[in-house]
Amino acid sequence: MKLSIVIPAFNEARRLPETLASIAEYLELVDLQSEVIVVDDGSTDGTTEAAKAVPGEGMPPKIIGFEGNRGKGAAVKEGMLAATGDYILFMDADNSTHITEVEKLLKVATEDKVPVVIGSRYLKGDSIKIKQPWYRVFVSRMGNRLIRYTILPGVIDTQCGFKLFKKASAHDIAPLLTRDRFSFDMELLVIAKQLGYDIREVPVNWYDTPGTRLRPIKSSFGTLRDLVAIKFNQLRGKYQPSAAESK
């Protein structure tokens, strides 16, 4: 079995090397063929150079570079399509969920044959080891409720940046993505459901990491706008394989 690890990165020269070092350390300990893909989303701080300098198992990572900043969704999409592993994980550059948590997701994916397995911060009360400020928690929970009630009933945590896909499902879903920024997570899961893929949530440990660029108020308005767009796309049948083929 081969695992592809996709990491979207924008101006992550400071945090990314530590994340890659922890991945290299993990890969040295497990019997798992792997590839690591960093998608540099138009960084201006030397992110690519910092990633190439990390030694160890699976390093240096394969680099996909954008000329300008296109957004996290665009970076994840490009990484998923480039990945060659039997299973494809995307995780955040800040290491908020450690690579060792992938074992929980792989267990469900392989033993229960689930094509889309996503990490969740909210299934267990002790999953969040370092909490966000209260206002970010409030905005996040309200956003999740709105998403569940409108487009993703039954999914508790759509936004956790730790998701695993069987290769076939990833390559079916990624071409249909239209959201280039933070709302891509919920669109991705809507597409998975539309295509008939089973989705399973698995509790993972999560640590709030300083340095996030997410602005709660601005993000809330963006999420509301994208919810409407995703629902409209869904009603128009845009999330069907034929829609991707016609692009």
Image (cartoon, grey):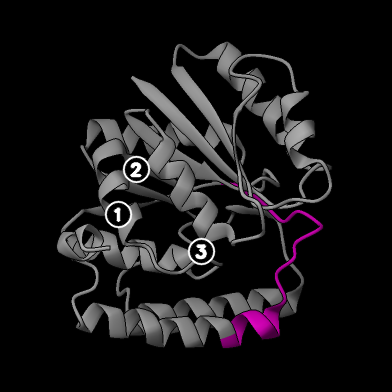
Is residue 111 toward the left or the right of residue 37 in the image?
left
Whole-number angstrom distance, CA of label 2 to CA of label 3: 15 Å
User: Image quadrant of residue 156?
Assistant: bottom left
Residues packed near mark 3 inside 10 Å, few (<14), some (14 to 19) or many (20 plus): some
What distance separates the C-alpha of mark 1 from that of mark 2?
10 Å
Residue 40: % across, % down: 65, 45
Point 66% across, 19% down: residue: 25
Label 3 or label 1, whichever lies nearer to me, is 1
Residue range highlighted in magenta:
205-221
Q: Is residue 26 left or right of residue 245?
A: right
Camera-nearest residue between 9 and 119: 9
Identified by mark 1, the residue type is Ile
Foreground disc of the pair 1, 2: 1
Q: Is residue 158 visible?
A: no
* Secondary-structure class at tag 2: strand
CB of mark 1 within 8 Å of CB of mark 2?
yes
Mark 2 and 3 residues: CB-CB less than 8 Å, in contact? no
Amino acid on which disc 2 is placed: Phe
